[in-house]
Image (tube, helix red, strand yellow):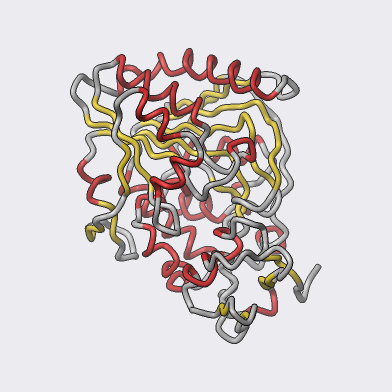
Amino acid sequence: METVQIVTTDPKLPLEELYHKGNDLLRESLTQYTHLFKKGDHVLVKPNLLSARDIDMGVTTHPKTLDVVLKFLLELETVPFVGDSPPDGNGYAVAKKTGLIEVCEKYNVNFVELDEPVKVKHSGEYDFSISKKVLDADKIVSLAKLKTHSLTILTLAVKNTFGCIPGKEKASWHFKALNNNNFAKLMVEICSVVNPTLNIVDGLVAHEGNGPSNGKPKRQGVIFLSENPFALDDAIASCLGVPRKKYPILIEAGKKKLIPQYQTTGEWSGSMALPKTSLVFSGLNFISNRFNVFKKKPSIDKERCIKCRKCERNCPVQAIDIDSFNIDYSKCIRCYVCHEVCPEDAIKLVGTLFK
């Protein structure tokens, strides 16, 4: 039977002490997974490097957490390397800004961009590419964050593998998938192909509200570990009171019988403010993104916008013109990629037929 390990510390501790205590507990917990790795294994550590935010916002993998994982792998005489592919395509810049490059340099570990797309053969419905560097790794450690997500409700272990698709290709999948259920099916297929050896979801400081980057940090004082990403996500959703039958990724994983029987060690019961954009609890989750009357629409806050054009570059349907601060809603598919990549929270999500 699979196991989901839950380790907790007091979230009310001073911030530095919270990180220190939490990662000490992570270090102790990792000793239970030494059997997964052997000397000489080339191990990809896949963090969450969505965008270059303050590390205390809970948006990206914390450097202290990466430090613990790299030290663990090096002590096992593996050959770890760190890699990701953010939506805007420059993982190194995000890793540098958030302190992960400093940790890599400390241990003489390489950081790589997850580029070089390779078409993969699998039994699913979608035809997608994975970075060659992912496919070439002997083992993969998924180092995700506990966050909400304006499209998928939560972004945990399964969703973290979406970063194995080279950055520039990600946005187009929001258009191709058409609705939340299909997008969730894509996430499940990608995760099944990537098949992480060990999955860690860091919630010492989580991110709630209109995540994955423009919500608010929330201290939770919890870290989850499991060999199985689907069991891990199911356990976390349960802890947060999100039913399996209302969470698209778990719905699709359940259809494929990918959620195994599992036991949990440790306990945690938390709460997070979920995104206002989600249709999951209304039962309208199946509706195509083209039926925009049911969904909140993105709007540009001219006062906050710095014209970095990340929203414009990453819009899969080219609906955004930053020069005129205009969004063409006849094109907009409400995928919220613009909201996700905006570094200044200048994309607001407003209006809907239903409250």
Q: x and y percent of residue 312 in the render?
A: 52, 72
Q: x and y percent of residue 5 in the render?
A: 52, 23
Residue 166 lies left or right of residue 276; in this view the side is: left
Query: What is the residue that sits farthest to the bottom in this orientation?
Result: 330
Residue 112 lies, with reference to residue 38, above or below; the image says: below
**Camera-side residue of 303 and 190:** 303
Residue 350 lies left or right of residue 154; in this view the side is: right
Residue 324 lies, with reference to residue 145, above or below; the image says: below
Residue drawn at x 54%, y 20% is 23
Residue 273 lies, with reference to residue 263, above or below; the image says: below
Residue 76 lies, with reference to residue 55, above or below; the image says: above
Q: Choose top left, top right, bottom left or bottom right for residue 138.
A: top left
Total marks placed: 0
Q: x and y percent of residue 135 in the render?
A: 23, 46
Q: x and y percent of residue 51 in the render?
A: 52, 50
Residue 297 lies left or right of residue 260; in this view the side is: right
**Camera-side residue of 96 and 221:** 96
- Which corner quadrant holds the C terminus? bottom right
**Camera-side residue of 219 and 128:** 219
Residue drawn at x 30%, y 65% is 127
Residue drawn at x 38%, y 58% is 167
Residue drawn at x 43%, y 39% is 47
